[in-house]
């Protein structure tokens, strides 16, 4: 990972970083709060060698001797002899070992100083113990260094600094603990964020979707909590979501510059990515521009189109493919003002994949395209079943819907590979449920401005083939008991006001 990926991981999981930092600071604060405040008192002894009529050489030798002896005195400051004497003199409620834990001693290098520190919850007790320890250590050193049979010791330990009453506790060090807690929490949060980002294979944005699929992202549909209540854009024609589908419509038209895209499949990788809603709203957006569209529910296993549009599902694509009814009988003109026709899935067949792979479906698609209609299939997801790959072979390409924040990278890659295995054209990827960064932008709730006859004229200009030497689409040959679908009646568009 480079620095950009680290920053992206921290940005994606910033809440985890903030949470761990807060927990680290809170843990440090609680630790400092439950700790008993400890006060420290310090005393200092000066160790010297006494000698009468000593010359410079003797003084130098005595100083070196004292420095060597002080190193040993550091270890006897908390000896039982000293601690027991202090306990008897002060009548303390401690044992010798407990008192020894409160005493520390050190000697600065190349000096004859002996520094003694005593900590205790009581500042007065810390001061009294420190003075008593210094007094007992001084006596103990004299007793140790007095030769046998002699009355005086050549080594003296004089108190040069008595203990003073401490005014502030030395522990807990709340500020330091808080700083360390915050730092540890920040480091832990950043580490967890990077680890989660590394292990997380979910598609998080259009860039990742394009890299994994190896195809362009032709549309982004924002995450709208109102989708479950108002799934179709006709319920909110001036909203941001409707504008996003109009942008997807425009991008699809740009894909047909080199040749008209008369039919396509909308599919996904796994259930729950919103491919049915995307297919329905894309069909509505195309119909709103004046284009004649037929939306066919190609999911013969779990139909959603009939529910979205509030249509009966008894007669549908299955009925047409088995020859029970002609396509005209299965087509529902959804709204009078829109040239949108809907074909539900119909009865559930025992062999959906085989039924969708028949020649009759290919002829049906070719006939509808030849009549000037744009055919959109809502197909099942690619990973559970092969129906979408079969349908993609019979159309001009497939749009793969991926749900940002839910679909895994390996799922999307496997779906794209399934389409390429059957030589199906991949028109692009639609990133669904994208978190919007700016919900109140200036252009967020503005309509496209193209309505009526102007929209129909613009749609025909863009969707028409750029050259005339292309082979015309094959027409559906009439079959016994079945007629080719005639072009739906044209709808008169009212001119837009002010245009």
Image: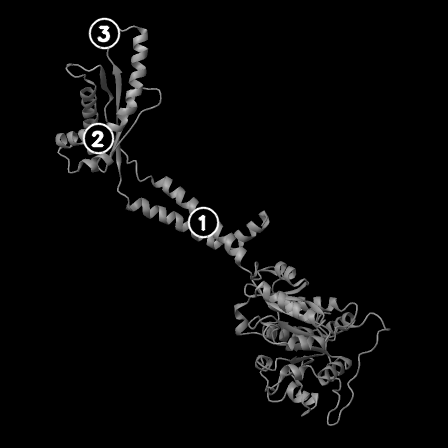
Tell me where residue 177 sits by quadrant.
top left
Q: Which residue, given by chain and number where applicable, does mark 1 sit on?
A: 188
Which quadrant, please, contains the C terminus? bottom right
| Mark 1 nearby-residue class (10 Å; few <14, some 14–19, many ≥20) | some
Residue 249 image position (x, y, % from top left): 69, 69
- Taking 326 as reference, is 46 left or right? left
Q: CA distance from mark 1 to mark 3?
A: 66 Å
Q: Which residue, given by chain and number where applicable, does mark 2 sit on?
A: 79
Residue 84 can be seen in this image: yes
Q: CA distance from mark 2 to mark 3?
A: 32 Å
| Mark 2 nearby-residue class (10 Å; few <14, some 14–19, many ≥20) | some
| Mark 3 nearby-residue class (10 Å; few <14, some 14–19, many ≥20) | few
- Taking 273 as reference, is 60 left or right? left
- Taking 276 as reference, is 166 left or right? left
Label disc, if present, on residue 62 of the rendered structure: none
Which-is-in-front pick, marks 2 and 1? 2
Q: CA distance from mark 2 to mark 1?
A: 43 Å
Q: Residue at coordinates 53% horizontally, 59% vertically from top-left?
A: 200
Residue 399 image position (x, y, % from top left): 67, 70
Chain-order first, disc 1 or disc 3: 3
Question: Is label 2 in contact with label 3 (beta carbons under 8 Å)?
Answer: no
Q: Secondary structure at mark 1?
A: helix
* Most distant residue in the bottom direction: 481
Q: Residue at coordinates 59% horizontally, 63% vertically from top-left?
A: 409
Residue 340 image position (x, y, % from top left): 68, 80
Residue 490 can be seen in this image: no
Q: Secondary structure at mark 2?
A: loop
Q: Which residue, given by chain and number where applicable, does mark 3 sit on?
A: 52
Q: Secondary structure at mark 3?
A: loop
Chain-order first, disc 2 or disc 3: 3
Q: How is the image coloured?
A: one colour
């Amino acid at each position: 990972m480079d620095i950009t990926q680290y920053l992206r991981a921290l940005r994606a999981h910033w809440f985890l970083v903030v949470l761990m930092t807060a927990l680290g600071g809170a843990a440090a604060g609680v630790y400092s709060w439950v700790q008993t405040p400890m006060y420290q008192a310090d005393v200092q002894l000066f160790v010297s060698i006494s000698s009468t009529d000593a010359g410079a050489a003797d003084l130098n030798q005595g100083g070196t001797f004292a420095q060597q002896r002080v190193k040993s005195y550091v270890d006897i400051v908390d000896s039982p002899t000293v601690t027991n004497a202090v306990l008897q003199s002060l009548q303390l409620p401690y044992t010798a070992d407990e008192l020894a834990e409160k005493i520390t001693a050190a000697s600065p290098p190349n000096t004859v100083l002996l520094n003694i520190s005593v900590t205790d919850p009581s500042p007065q007790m810390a001061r009294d113990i420190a003075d008593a320890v210094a007094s007992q250590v001084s006596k103990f050193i004299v007793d140790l260094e007095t030769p046998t049979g002699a009355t005086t010791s050549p080594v003296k330990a004089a108190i040069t600094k008595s203990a003073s009453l401490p005014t502030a506790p030395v522990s807990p060090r709340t500020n330091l603990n808080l700083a360390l807690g915050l730092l540890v929490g920040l480091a832990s949060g950043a580490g967890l964020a990077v680890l989660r980002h590394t292990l997380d294979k979910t598609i998080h944005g259009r860039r990742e979707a394009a890299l994994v699929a190896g195809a362009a992202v032709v549309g982004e549909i924002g995450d709208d909590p109102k989708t479950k209540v108002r799934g179709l854009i006709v319920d909110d024609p001036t909203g941001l979501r409707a504008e996003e589908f109009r942008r997807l419509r425009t991008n699809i038209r740009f894909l047909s510059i080199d040749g008209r895209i008369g039919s396509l499949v909308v599919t996904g990788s796994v259930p729950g990515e919103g491919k049915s809603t995307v297919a329905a709203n894309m069909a509505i957006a195309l119909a709103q521009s004046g284009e004649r569209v037929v939306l066919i529910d190609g999911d013969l296993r779990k139909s959603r189109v009939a529910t979205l549009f509030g249509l009966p599902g008894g007669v549908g694509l299955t009925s047409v493919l088995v020859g029970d009814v002609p396509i005209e009988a299965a087509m529902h003109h959804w709204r009078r003002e829109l040239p949108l026709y809907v074909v539900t899935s119909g009865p559930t067949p025992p062999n959906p994949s085989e039924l969708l792979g028949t020649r009759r479906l290919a002829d049906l698609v070719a006939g509808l395209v030849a009549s000037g209609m744009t055919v959109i299939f809502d197909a099942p997801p690619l990973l559970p079943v092969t129906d979408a790959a079969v349908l993609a072979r019979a159309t001009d390409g497939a749009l793969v819907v991926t749900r940002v924040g839910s679909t895994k990278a390996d799922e999307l890659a496997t779906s794209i590979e399934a389409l390429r295995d059957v030589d199906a054209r991949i028109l692009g990827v639609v990133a669904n449920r994208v978190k919007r960064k700016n919900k109140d932008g200036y252009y967020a709730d503005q309509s496209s401005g193209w309505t009526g006859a102007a929209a129909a004229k613009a749609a025909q200009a863009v969707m028409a083939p750029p050259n005339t030497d292309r082979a015309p689409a094959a027409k559906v040959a009439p079959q016994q008991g079945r007629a080719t679908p005639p072009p739906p009646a044209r709808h008169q568009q009212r001119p837009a006001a002010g245009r």
